[in-house]
């Protein structure tokens, strides 16, 4: 008779082999889940499982939030809102040493509030701010590293697609996770800016001083950026105040972003078609990931492999801090190899039961999880955001970009240590708003 737990182990190995063969992650997880469930329960029930899990995903209002937020980000980018943010930040701090890098971080943070994707934020500002920094004499590696690290802010600052996915998989409220991410996001921005200030003092030649913007230029930059401020406040503030659900907020944001792009006469048939196709492609990829993860998770639940893992870890006598350290290392590796969504989806069926068994708050762990994945997107051997910047600026050596992100990796480790040591930094604001 087939040992269910061993069948799950073989299923995991088969999943990773399929991924190495360039089978999409969601498809790989779905296939192994279907075959494993079929071997245990029969392939008739396995086919029924496909129908039920697919219909559940497609009918989920929470998951419908994702394509709407992706569409909002596409329209915001089409409307040039990212350039407005960068110009505003540059007008305020561009005259300082390291000011262009600070402006890039500020722009990435603001754009993350209307985009929700790390790779998209890095790609957008790789085209918007990297040429400006290079033309002003910034060290190429540090300039590219700044954009790569600033891009990671896109998956922590609401509205974040990965937070929605975590909420769906963990059955937590989306708005609770969004609110919990606000203080860690502010800490991230502060540490990024502090890193630039320290680096600028250490290597002043790498971060030249730019010209000071006049009062008129600052006012014009502020006036031109009002739309992105209104969009971010409406989307995030509306959810926090309980005016909108997450799905309603995403829909309102998408309509507003389209209206702003239309007001600027940026909507053309070709650009609109490209934005819609890009949104559909991204949404389809995420839905396939979620459905595949659900199929594999259903299979794992039947085998009781997560419960066996919890019992095994508890019986091992490992201190909780050591087990958490191993989990974090695993997520860093996953973030370096997969994109942020795949890194979370692949591990969730096994990690979440462990976290709950140790008595940790799933909301706290969700934020920690995202921070760790952010870190993985910056470190060798892959580092998704580093390769995005390498694709945009092929003349910059890969080793130089990795050296450029090193100071930000250090600041991210400081942030991770703070969030691990003081869970209240994550959980305080949701508790206050709950009353």
Image (cartoon, rainbow, N blue to C red):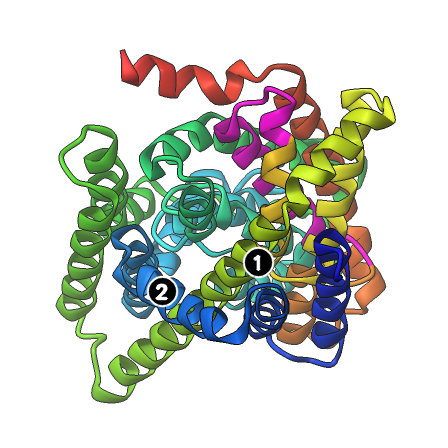
Q: How many numbered marks have been drawn onto this rendered protein structure?
A: 2
Instruction: Please give the name of the residue rendered at 17% of the width and 49% of the height, measured from the top-left corner.
Output: 248
Instruction: Please give the name of the residue rendered at 43% of the width and 70% of the height, measured from the top-left corner.
Output: 50
The residue lying furthest to the bottom in this view is 270
Whole-percent x, y for residue 40 in the image: 62, 64
> Where, quadrant-wise, is the C terminus in this rendering?
top left
Relative to residue 126, is residue 347 drawn left or right?
right
Which one is nearer the viewer's eye here, 5 or 23? 5
Relative to residue 320, is residue 30 drawn left or right?
left
Instruction: Please give the name of the residue rendered at 66% of the width and 62% of the height, measured from the top-left corner.
Output: 338
Relative to residue 159, is residue 229 drawn left or right?
left
Whole-percent x, y for residue 343 in the image: 63, 55
Other residues around mark 2 within 10 Å, as few (<14) / some (14–19) / many (≥20): few
Q: What secondary structure predominates along the stretch shown in magenta? A: helix
User: Magenta stretch?
Assistant: 355-380
Residue 346: name its quadrant: bottom right
Q: Give me the disc on residue 52.
A: 2
Up/down of 18 relative to 3, above or below: below
Relative to residue 404, is residue 174 drawn left or right?
left
Up/down of 270 relative to 195, above or below: below
First in sequence: mark 2 vs mark 1: 2
Residue that label 1 marks = 299
> Where, quadrant-wise, is the N terminus in this rendering?
bottom right
């Amino acid at each position: 008779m087939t040992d269910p737990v061993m069948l799950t182990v073989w299923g995991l190995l088969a999943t990773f082999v399929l991924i190495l063969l360039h089978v999409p992650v969601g498809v790989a997880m779905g296939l192994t889940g279907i075959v494993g469930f079929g071997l245990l329960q029969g392939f008739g029930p396995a086919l029924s499982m496909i129908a039920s899990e697919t219909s559940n995903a497609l009918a989920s209002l929470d998951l419908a939030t994702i394509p709407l937020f992706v569409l909002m980000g596409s329209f915001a980018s089409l409307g040039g809102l990212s350039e407005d943010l960068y110009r505003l930040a540059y007008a305020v701090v561009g005259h300082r040493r390291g000011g262009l890098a600070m402006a890039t971080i500020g722009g990435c943070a603001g754009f993350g509030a209307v985009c929700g994707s790390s790779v998209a934020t890095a790609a957008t500002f790789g085209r918007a701010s990297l040429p400006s920094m290079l033309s002003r004499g910034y060290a190429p590696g540090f300039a590219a590293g700044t954009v790569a690290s600033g891009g990671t802010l896109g998956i922590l600052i609401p509205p974040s697609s990965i937070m929605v996915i975590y909420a769906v998989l963990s059955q937590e409220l989306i708005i609770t996770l969004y609110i919990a991410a606000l203080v860690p996001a502010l800490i991230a921005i502060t540490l990024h800016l502090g890193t630039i200030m320290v680096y600028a003092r250490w290597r002043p030649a790498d971060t030249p001083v730019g010209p000071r913007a006049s009062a008129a230029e600052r006012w014009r930059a502020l006036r031109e950026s009002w739309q992105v401020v209104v969009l971010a406040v409406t989307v995030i503030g509306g959810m926090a105040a309980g005016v909108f659900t997450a799905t309603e907020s995403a829909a309102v944001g998408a309509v507003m972003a389209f209206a702003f792009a239309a007001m600027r006469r940026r909507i053309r048939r070709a650009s609109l078609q490209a934005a819609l196709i890009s949104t559909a492609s991204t949404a389809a990829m995420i839905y396939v990931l979620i459905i595949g993860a659900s199929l594999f998770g259903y299979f794992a639940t039947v085998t009781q492999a997560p419960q066996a893992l919890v019992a095994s870890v508890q019986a091992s006598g490992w201190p909780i801090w050591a087990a958490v350290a191993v989990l974090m290392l695993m997520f860093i590796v996953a973030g370096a190899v997969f994109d942020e969504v795949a890194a979370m989806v692949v591990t969730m069926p096994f990690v979440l039961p462990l976290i709950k068994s140790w008595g940790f708050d799933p909301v706290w762990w969700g934020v920690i999880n995202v921070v760790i994945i952010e870190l993985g997107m910056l470190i060798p051997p892959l580092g998704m955001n580093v390769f995005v910047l390498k694709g945009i600026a092929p003349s910059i050596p890969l080793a130089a970009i990795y050296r450029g992100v090193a100071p930000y990796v250090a600041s991210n480790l400081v942030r991770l240590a703070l969030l691990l040591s003081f869970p209240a930094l994550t959980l305080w604001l949701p508790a206050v708003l709950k009353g």
